[in-house]
Image: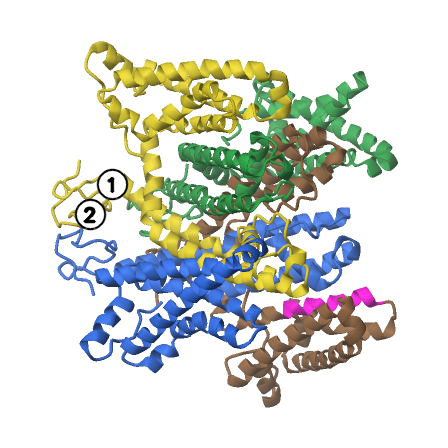
Chain colours: A green, B brown, C blue, D yellow
Amino acid sequence: MTRATHQAGAGPLRQKLFSVIFRSDTPAGMAFDVLLIAAILVSVTVVMLTTVEGVNSRHGRTLYLIEWVFTIAFTAEYVLRLYCVRRPAHYATSFFGIVDLLSILPTYLGLLFTGAGPMLVLRILRILRLFRVMHMANYVTDANILLEVLKSSWRKTLIFIYAVVTLVVIFATLMHFIEGPEAGFTSIPMSMYWGIVTLTTVGYGDITPLTPLGKFIATITMILGYGIIAVPMGIYFSEYTQATRRERSKATCKSCGQRGHETDARYCRTCGEELERD
Amino acid sequence: MTRATHQAGAGPLRQKLFSVIFRSDTPAGMAFDVLLIAAILVSVTVVMLTTVEGVNSRHGRTLYLIEWVFTIAFTAEYVLRLYCVRRPAHYATSFFGIVDLLSILPTYLGLLFTGAGPMLVLRILRILRLFRVMHMANYVTDANILLEVLKSSWRKTLIFIYAVVTLVVIFATLMHFIEGPEAGFTSIPMSMYWGIVTLTTVGYGDITPLTPLGKFIATITMILGYGIIAVPMGIYFSEYTQATRRERSKATCKSCGQRGHETDARYCRTCGEELERD
Amino acid sequence: MTRATHQAGAGPLRQKLFSVIFRSDTPAGMAFDVLLIAAILVSVTVVMLTTVEGVNSRHGRTLYLIEWVFTIAFTAEYVLRLYCVRRPAHYATSFFGIVDLLSILPTYLGLLFTGAGPMLVLRILRILRLFRVMHMANYVTDANILLEVLKSSWRKTLIFIYAVVTLVVIFATLMHFIEGPEAGFTSIPMSMYWGIVTLTTVGYGDITPLTPLGKFIATITMILGYGIIAVPMGIYFSEYTQATRRERSKATCKSCGQRGHETDARYCRTCGEELERD
Amino acid sequence: MTRATHQAGAGPLRQKLFSVIFRSDTPAGMAFDVLLIAAILVSVTVVMLTTVEGVNSRHGRTLYLIEWVFTIAFTAEYVLRLYCVRRPAHYATSFFGIVDLLSILPTYLGLLFTGAGPMLVLRILRILRLFRVMHMANYVTDANILLEVLKSSWRKTLIFIYAVVTLVVIFATLMHFIEGPEAGFTSIPMSMYWGIVTLTTVGYGDITPLTPLGKFIATITMILGYGIIAVPMGIYFSEYTQATRRERSKATCKSCGQRGHETDARYCRTCGEELERD
């Protein structure tokens, strides 16, 4: 979650627009952000409601209208973003640039092709635009810590996932031969589906063991799943603690050298000197 | 969970009453608290039992009688609270003042309007009165720590909830198109219900995927849910550890009022003023 | 989990017997413990098997025989325990003394009263005898830490349980009125059963919401349950870390004063001096 | 997860082969590892697909062919491993040597015995070969930490498992007598299956209580299960934190070989010898 790297184009109008649309450190920029979040949430809700049969048959016309209002608004926003940014091509090919385009394109394509129904659902990806709010102050630090945790623990996570997959494959094979098709364990992949449903403690109950031996093996699977959940938690938490500590230690007192100040500290807790932040 | 801010009214009777009803540092005040807890628990149980058909048809009369005994007792308590407090209006409009009123009002309104059955259930809110026990010594500190954790981690929690919602929306849309209405994924909101049931590992089994591809996507949802549960736990725990540490060092800045300094802090991190220690 | 406070009676035979039966620091005592664990496990399994119809109808006679062998063996052990301990009455009224008696009594009573079937199941309490193994070296420390954690966090646990109960009552009342008897929410206590099944992420699926609004409320219950599980974990873990640290800090170097040595340390890590342990 | 202890045989060809097959510090060795992982994953998928009726009836011939290609490739690999290693017997009797043999044997035996269908599934154990990737740099350390955690917490885990088993036995016995066979609690072992399904929060819903008292006991079981999950997590995490810290301080005592000293340790905690640091 790096800070947005886009820069304002030349000219006062483009700079003014840029600060409203891309930043949130002015009242106008903040207001735009809040408005955008509201628009995204309402428009995603509208997309969802069109899939509810009862609602669509009665209010389909209204939903279609609202949809077009948002599409036009988002189109205007997209054009303004292209206009006010210094390098429009850079923005258009960035992750959020593509998401912004995908948010409006399906509605227009729906006019050209009649059978484009399923494609319209791509508009639900508008929800990804919500992550724009992350460029608001303070969120960056918090999101960074979460990402850093994922990055520094990926190797341990891989070992963990691999051990889980091995367990699932072995237990699934056992259950396939013990229980057989009557109980729903028709094949090894189907048994693996059961294995993951059980190991993650979801437990739908659509496939359950019927024989005493099968129930015994299932019991062992559950206890293992119950114990195994502790492993990723331990890993993530340990990395999280370290990432928080590192984040805090970025601030060092210029006067006495004291490190590890809390993120909201403005004065050194050891010598009272004002802290400088980058 | 701030300490009760009400103060006793003038006169020895009101002061005596206040110390019994509002405080728990005297034997009488302690006894009143214990009695109140018992009364609340019994009266909530009575409200619950009136909704059990078998019990209500046989013992309805008895339950009605008990209900009136408690209503009259709680009314007397409410009047006494209004009487002994210095500013009755302040108490009446406070959170607990409203809860106290809502605990007795429905029974009286039930006399006036015959069809007020459902409203009677508002009496179950009496259970909120139990939180009065929290003003007992030591609970305040513990409850404060829990609240402080929630407060200081709300931004990370928001990012987390937002990421979960995005995941649910995307997986729900996928499942709606892969599985369709036969399996119960009749609309995107219905699929989202399935998504949350799965991601939280509740797994009712009222909606389950039927196609191999749907089962595969469901499997991925479960594994993600299993991994994601580690994130809020890491967050809360880390904040909890810090909150406990800060609570232990009860230094408050005399100059700006900033609380929660680290144990080795000698200067306020907000205003740079030297801290005084007891 | 305090160390057994029983003492050996007078005379070499009673002392010899005591060291075998009550202690495990001699080879004979260790062998007795292992034998006892095996006997307990087998005899509990036998009690369980008598409740399995298919097994009982075919092997009922054999099970009955084995049961009597164990009852006589445990009776002999009980008599020997009474004989070799200094204060038999003290042993007989201790927790394990009562468990030991309850392990043998039902079989004898089964001879006197024909209809004592259900009572025979009391023999399953023999499993509690397994905790005797805990007096073996090292287990005491580990069990002590776990108990200390529970003790020091009971107040926070109480606040937590109370908050959960309030949530369950309020959500159960809501669901009772939204869903009604068709979906299985026949009364508030029944709805509370659903609430706990959902909040603990067990999710049997025997009672599930049918209306859209009910599904929405259920969704919120699940997310709350998912978030709430983090709280007791944070509490227990924090207390656990502190208990471990305290346990470690019991060893202090007499030479340099360094505290917090690991539990298996024999020499001070700062000055190399040998550590004394109590 | 100790480092592979096999050594290359004499001669340049054997040494070259050894470095490719057994090690991954050369480009050729790395490429071989990646190829091996791909081959294992594809061949395990093929074994799984043969159990899916629809796929097997249509593409059975193709799957059979692919299976033989992999069997021959793995046989060649096995022969090369035997050839290039210094002590073939040592390799052949090692864990991975046996897994390697089990990966190819079933296909050959399938030629000799016609009814060997079920045995063919042993080939799924090929997935264990994936753990070979663990000898790649850095994984060893991470896997070591995870193993060390399991090793140092086994006693606490045992106490925990024992407490859980006792709980399950007692609650299962209660439910067997309260609910009886109508609800599916036909015997104590069957009730224990229900108990574990509930305590681990899996909650299939194939056996659920029907009576109010049974539902109440089930509720208590769930809440206990919910609270108990915190215990192993606290244990594992605490041990994990300590193991990570020890791993970072890779000091080994020159005198007694004790590893895992704390970062500030200057003397060995086992023999009191001064530690040398790199």
Instruction: Compare residues D133 and C58 and report the one nearer the observer.
Output: C58
Dot 1 falls on a residue whose secondary structure is loop
**Can residue D275 be seen at all in this image of the molecule?**
yes
The rendered magenta stretch, by its main secondary structure, is classed as helix
Splitting the image into 4 quarters, where does residue D243 fall? top left
How far apart are labels 2 and 1 at the CA level? 9 Å
Q: Tell which subunit mark 2 falls on.
A: D
Instruction: Compare residues A73 and C99 and report the one nearer the observer.
Output: C99
- Looking at numbered disc 2 in the image, what kind of residue is underneath it? Ala
Task: Judge from the rendering whether residue C69 lies leftward or rightward of residue A85; answer left or right.
Answer: left
Splitting the image into 4 quarters, where does residue B253 fall? bottom left
- Mark seen at residue D249: 1
Q: Residue furthest bottom?
A: B12
Number of marks: 2
The vertical placement of A180 against B269, above or below, is above
Residues in magenta, as a range: B116-129
Q: Residues within 10 Å of mark 2 (few under 14, many from 20)?
A: some
The vertical placement of B40 against A23, above or below, is below
- Mark seen at residue B63: none
Task: Judge from the rendering whether residue D44 lies leftward or rightward of residue C91; answer left or right.
Answer: right
Dot 2 falls on a residue whose secondary structure is loop
Q: Find disc 2 in the rendering and name its residue.
A: D265
Residue at (66%, 62%) from the top-left corner?
C169
Task: Judge from the rendering whether residue A3 lies leftward or rightward of residue B120; answer left or right.
Answer: left
The vertical placement of D10 against D179, above or below, is above
Residue D48, x across and y down, in percent: 54, 26
